[in-house]
Image: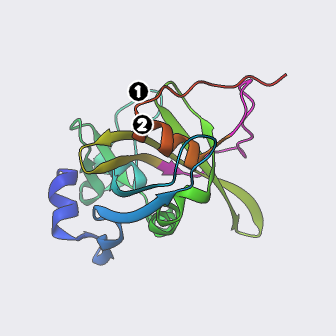
Amino acid sequence: MKWSEIIRSERIVIGGVEYDLRHLHDAVYDITIPGSGNHQDIKTKLFVRYSSHCISVGPEDDVPIDFDIVGIEKRILDHRLVPRAFSEERYELSKMLPGIFSKIVDRKCFYSSDRNFFIIEFIDKEGGKASYCVYFNVKKEVEGLDVYVESAYVPRVIVRPNDGSRSIQARVILAKRFRGEQIKRIPLR
């Protein structure tokens, strides 16, 4: 089934178990981005949307998922119509996403690519530390800022950003996107 249909239905049923997806509905938050320097505070709306990648896994090494083995009811077609498989682990972790984005202004972020950023939420998983990485992009819309959460998962190894650039505060990302300014990576010295 397509992600757009699944999220509209507010649930997915796997093996007779119903998983509530209302926490991944589009959300709107009223935010205030603190001013700095010559810039005043910005009061705006933050529109947050979530992709199916927050609760599903894709093919590994470009090998398609065998749904005869995984189970056809786990099949989710993402926004590009690529088949992915429902992940109970990603689903459980996705329940943290609204809390992360409702308070994003205060978060430390890292650069992922030219237009994407990610947040690392350290969690306790089975008695050990794990990195929950949340990838997103932000763009200015007429009525505020649009945040698209592209993916969220625990990678196989703990992520320690070391790409030669510093972290960036979410409030800086949001303010610059709101004002239409370019966001430049600041290299480590």
User: In the rendered view, would you say 52 is above or below 188?
Assistant: below
Determine the CA span between mark 1 and mark 2: 39 Å
- Examine the image and state in which quarter residue 39 appears: top right
Q: Is residue 42 magenta?
A: no
Q: Is residue 164 left or right of residue 9?
A: right
The residue closer to the viewer here, 5 or 23, is 23
Residue at 42 percent of width and 36 percent of height: 179
- Examine the image and state in which quarter residue 18 appears: bottom left
Label 2 secondary element? helix
The residue closer to the viewer here, 151 or 69, is 151
Amino acid identity at mark 2: Arg
Residue under pointer 1: 62
- Characterize the magenta stretch by its predominant secondary structure: loop
Q: Is residue 121 left or right of residue 127?
A: left
Residue 143 point in image, percent of width and height: 25, 51
Residue at 16 percent of width and 68 percent of height: 9
Q: How is the image coloured?
A: rainbow
Label 1 secondary element? loop
Region in magenta: 152-167
Furthest residue toward right: 189
The image's mark for residue 179 is 2
Residue at 57 percent of width and 42 percent of height: 172
Around disc 1, counting alpha carbons within 10 Å, would you say few (fewer than 14), some (14 to 19), or many (20 or more)?
Answer: few
Residue 129 point in image, percent of width and height: 76, 60
